[in-house]
Amino acid sequence: MPRLSDEEALARLTAHDHGVLCTIHPERGIDAVPCVYAVDDDGYVGIPVDTVKPKSSTRLQRERNLEADPRATLLAEQWDADDWSKLWWVRLELRRQADASPEREAALGDLLAGRYPQYRDEPFAKVLVLRIVNALGWEAVPSLH
């Protein structure tokens, strides 16, 4: 299997602009939602709860899910309908860090603001902080590194 190294998996995920966050709803099971994110050098991921996009509340289901079960998965992938040799995916196993310091949350917010122009003014109700537990990646054709 053309598996990506942990370093290459993290590099691809960090360079990618969005993914799918999967949390566990206590009754329905897996909840999957598209998201943006930032990854810091210490192995933490920030998922914004912003005030830019319309929503009925800033207390999102993903946060409630993480309170009930701190496990999450973040999936990013590259699809090319014409050239399957360019396919790849990266999956991070994550754990919510409810006790993350305000400094870590703020630093991840800064990364998000630097990465996405819509977040330039840091319009966050909060930034969910998750620790990377494991990284797994696959590519159709091994890269020449």
Image (cartoon, helix red, strand yellow):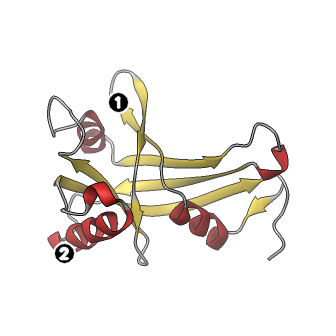
Q: Hey, which residue is sitting farthest front in the picture? A: 117
Secondary structure beneath dot 1 equals strand
Q: Residue at x 14, y 33 (%)?
A: 57
Asked whether, in this view, residue 94 is left or right of residue 15, the answer is left
* Foreground label between 2 and 1: 2
Measuring from the top left, give residue 91's x and y in whole percent: 58, 52
- Pick the front one: 18 or 98: 18
| Vertical comparison of 15 with 118: above or below | below
Q: Residue at x 83, y 44 (%)?
A: 83
- The label shown at residue 100 is none
Circle nearer the N terminus (2, 1)? 1
| Vertical comparison of 144 with 35: above or below | below
Quarter holding the C terminus is: bottom right
Measuring from the top left, give residue 8's x and y in whole percent: 66, 69
Measuring from the top left, give residue 37's x and y in whole percent: 39, 56
Number of marks in picture: 2
Q: To which residue does mark 1 refer?
A: 25
Q: Residues within 10 Å of mark 2 (few under 14, many from 20)?
A: few
Q: Amino acid at mark 2?
A: Glu
Secondary structure beneath dot 2 equals helix
Asked whether, in this view, residue 72 is left or right of residue 119, the answer is right
- Indicate the quadrant where residue 47 lies: bottom left
Q: Residue at x 76, y 36 (%)?
A: 81
Q: To which residue does mark 2 refer?
A: 103
Q: Hey, which residue is sitting farthest top in the picture? A: 28
Q: Residues within 10 Å of mark 1 (few under 14, many from 20)?
A: some
| Vertical comparison of 42 with 27: above or below | below
Q: Residue at x 51, y 65 (%)?
A: 14
Asked whether, in this view, residue 137 is left or right of residue 52, the answer is right
